[in-house]
Amino acid sequence: MKNIAILASGSGSNAEKIINHFQGSTKARISLIASNKKAAYVLERAKKHGVPTHTFTKAELESGKLTEILINQHIDFVVLAGFLLQIPKGLIKAFPNQIVNIHPALLPKYGGKGMYGDNVHKAVKAAEEKETGITIHLVNENYDEGKIIFQTAVKIDKIDTPDQIAEKVHILEHKYYPKIIESLI
């Protein structure tokens, strides 16, 4: 049985879909939800499902303290789900090819520092793209540049607002992220 840790900074809708997907699984379980924000709603979602939680500071992430916690908790695989901080080299080295992220666009477009959530959807709208989607990729030391594992697209209508684009992308995230994670472990 593989132990999965989810790192998240926000509301945690993807984290909750992943928790639900692995409930009753004989392959893996969600063993920890960790957040850099004490008020992140993802922590409430985790508690509702009986998943242990941990909060940490950016300094604890960068110093390796979080890496130590993940190792001590026997974590095998790390999932980023709306996690906004850059993953340090030490964590990547401790979990080689075992850290995955989801990005709300078709990388390499609309990736990089500051390109998350509404920022991505507004940029996609401003560029008058005809489609957008999700990219699931391995994490390396650069934002959104790791090996791409999976992409899928959705059509954008001219009249779609950034919020409507976000809704379409969330549907893809919730449908595919848990399945792709399962295929990787």
Image (cartoon, helix red, strand yellow):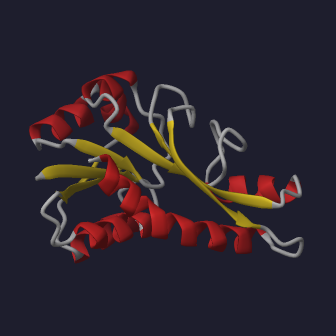
Q: Among all residues in the image, which is located at the extreme front? A: 183
Measured as percent of width and height from the top left, residue 123 is found at 79, 52
Give the residue at x 65% y 52%.
Answer: 105
Say above or below: 20 vs 34: below
Give the residue at x 10% y 53%.
Answer: 1
Measured as percent of width and height from the top left, residue 159 is found at 88, 76
Q: Quadrant of residue 131?
A: bottom right
Q: Quadrant of residue 112?
A: top right
User: How many discs mark residues in the rendered view?
Assistant: 0
Residues 114 and 129: in front is 129
Measured as percent of width and height from the top left, residue 75 is found at 17, 43
Image-based side of 62 in relation to 95, left or right:
right
Give the residue at x 22% y 74%.
Answer: 49
Image-based side of 184 in relation to 167, left or right:
left
Question: Does the rendering let one see residue 11?
Answer: no
Image-based side of 98 in relation to 144, left or right:
left
Q: Quadrant of residue 14?
A: bottom left
Residues 155 and 61: in front is 155
Question: Does the rendering let one see residue 173?
Answer: yes
Say above or below: 46 vs 118: below
Measured as percent of width and height from the top left, residue 21 is found at 30, 70
